[in-house]
Amino acid sequence: MTPEEAVSKINATFTVHEERGIATGWTDQNDKVMGMGARDMDTAPNGEPYEVVTSYGLGARLPKDALVMFQSESLAVRWWFDEVEDWASSLRSGREYWKRLNLYWRDKPTFHTTTYLAMDQGGLFRTSSPLAAIHQIDLGFVWSRLLISTIGPNGEET
C-alpha cells in the first residue's frame, strides 16, 4: 500500500474536512473582534489540536528513546494505517459508526527514509577490501499530522 492509497481508504472511511487550521480574530481594547488574522495551523477547524501520527505511534504515545524503522514503504504505511484505525476504534467502536467521525488533515502521510551504513565485522576478516564489508541499508517511517474527532467544524458533536 502506498501513502496515496492509504489516504484514499481513510478518506472513504470518515467525514473529511479539507479546511486546515482555525481562523483567529484580533480584537481591540474592548474585546470587539476587528477582523480575522492569520490561521492557527496547530489547531483544527473544530478547535482541537492536530495529532502527529506515525508508523511507530500516535501523539503522546510516541516513543522517546527509539523509533521503529522499516525497509519497506508498504509495511510502514500499513503500520501507519493501523495506528489511524486504532485511534478511530478508541473514539467509536464499530466501523459502521466511523463515517460519523470527522477527519481533519493537516499534513497527509509521507514516507521518510534515511540511509545507514553497516559494517559486516565478520566479513571484514574474509575479504581483502574493507569496503566490501560495508553495506547500505535504507530505513524509513511514515509521518503525518491529522485529527480524528467526534466534534464537527461547527463545534457540535456528531
Image: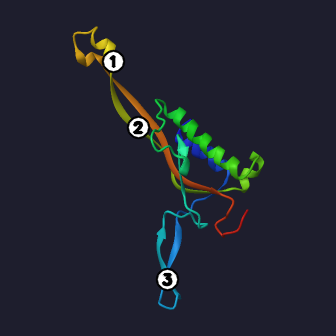
Pointer 2 residue? 113
Q: Residue at x 64, y 48 (%)?
A: 87
Return the residue found at the far bottom.
30
Marks 3 and 1 sit apart, C-alpha to C-alpha, by 63 Å
The circle drawn on residue 83 is none
Marks 3 and 2 sit apart, C-alpha to C-alpha, by 43 Å
Of 68 and 100, which appears nearest the observer?
68
Q: Earlier in the sequence, mark 3 or mark 2?
A: 3
Determine whether 135 is above or below 20 in the image.
above
For marks 2 and 1, give the one nearer the viewer.
Answer: 1
Whether the residues at callouts 3 and 1 have beta carbons within 8 Å, the answer is: no
Determine whether 125 is above or below 38 in the image.
above
Q: Earlier in the sequence, mark 3 or mark 1?
A: 3
Return the residue found at the far left.
128
Marks 2 and 1 sit apart, C-alpha to C-alpha, by 22 Å
Q: Amino acid at mark 1?
A: Asp
Is 120 left or right of 76, judged from the image as shown? Answer: left
Which quadrant, please, contains the C terminus?
bottom right
Q: Amino acid at mark 3?
A: Gly
Q: Amino acid at mark 2?
A: Thr
Dot 3 lies on which element?
Answer: strand
- The x, y position of residue 27, in whole percent, is 49, 85
- The x, y position of residue 61, in whole percent, is 55, 47
- The x, y position of residue 57, in whole percent, is 54, 43
Pointer 1 residue? 120
Q: Residues within 10 Å of mark 3 (few under 14, many from 20)?
A: few
Whether the residues at callouts 2 and 1 have beta carbons within 8 Å, the answer is: no
Q: Is residue 109 visible?
A: no
Whether the residues at callouts 3 and 2 have beta carbons within 8 Å, the answer is: no
Pointer 3 residue? 35
